[in-house]
Image: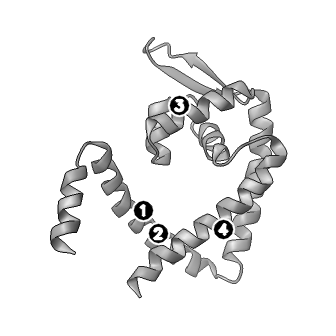
Amino acid sequence: MEKYILRNIGSIYRATNSFTDYIVKHVDLEKGQYQFLVRIQENQDINQEGLSSLLQVDKATTAKAIRKLIEKGYVVKTKSIEDKRNFKLQLTDLGKNTCDFLNKEEIFCIQSALKGLTKKEQNELNSLLEKINNNIGSIWSDIRNGKQNYYLNKIKNEY
């Protein structure tokens, strides 16, 4: 039973992601780029490191996605006034308009996924998923901070 929980979450993620990837082709975005764009909209002036952490992806993935979004005219990088070594990410008008469309697509996906669930069930589900996300998020953070061998040894010796 337990193994099916993450398998179901993965299946939901893949199906939703595939649908969204198909839809975003119509606004000239590639796989996964919409996630970066929407998070920049939600977190004005975020930097690449903050974006990597928020999306739980490595810095190289974020750098590649941002470079492509800049090339396509969705995002601009501006130097931080507080720290000249740091850059803030901001949406262009094209990026803002595209996010308006992406937000509508997200509403459609949410309504489709939650159809038939009561508000109470939705709240319970969200609460449980937040706990799972926090558990996995701490592992992701550890891996990012060099604790890979700890988890390799734990898996080899305990499971």
Residue ID for mark 3:
63
Residue ID for mark 4:
15
Residue type, mark 3 in image: Ala
Relative to 68, residue 80 above or below: above
Q: Real-space Cα distance between discs 4 and 1? A: 19 Å
At 70% across and 25% down in the image, what residue appears?
71
Residue type, mark 1 in image: Asn
Residue ID for mark 2:
129
Sequence-wise first label, 4 or 1: 4
Is the C-beta separation of discs 3 and 2 under 8 Å? no
At 41% across and 80% down in the image, what residue appears?
3
Looking at the rendered image, the disc whose residue lies closer to the viewer, 2 or 4, is: 4
Residue type, mark 4 in image: Ala
Q: Real-space Cα distance between discs 1 and 3? A: 24 Å
Residue 95 image offset from top left, x and y in percent: 74, 34
As drawn, the residue found furthest toward the left would be: 157
Is the C-beta separation of discs 2 and 4 under 8 Å? no
Q: Real-space Cα distance between discs 4 and 3? A: 26 Å
Residue ID for mark 1:
133
* 134 lies left or right of 11: left
Q: Viewer-proximal residue, 19 or 134?
A: 19
Is the C-beta separation of discs 1 and 3 under 8 Å? no
**Element under disc 4:** helix
Sequence-wise first label, 1 or 3: 3
Residue type, mark 2 in image: Leu
Q: Viewer-proximal residue, 112 or 58?
A: 58
Q: Dot 1: within a 10 Å radius of its alpha carbon, few (fewer than 14), some, or many (20 or more) residues?
A: few
Relative to 29, residue 48 above or below: above
Residue 144 image offset from top left, x and y in percent: 32, 44
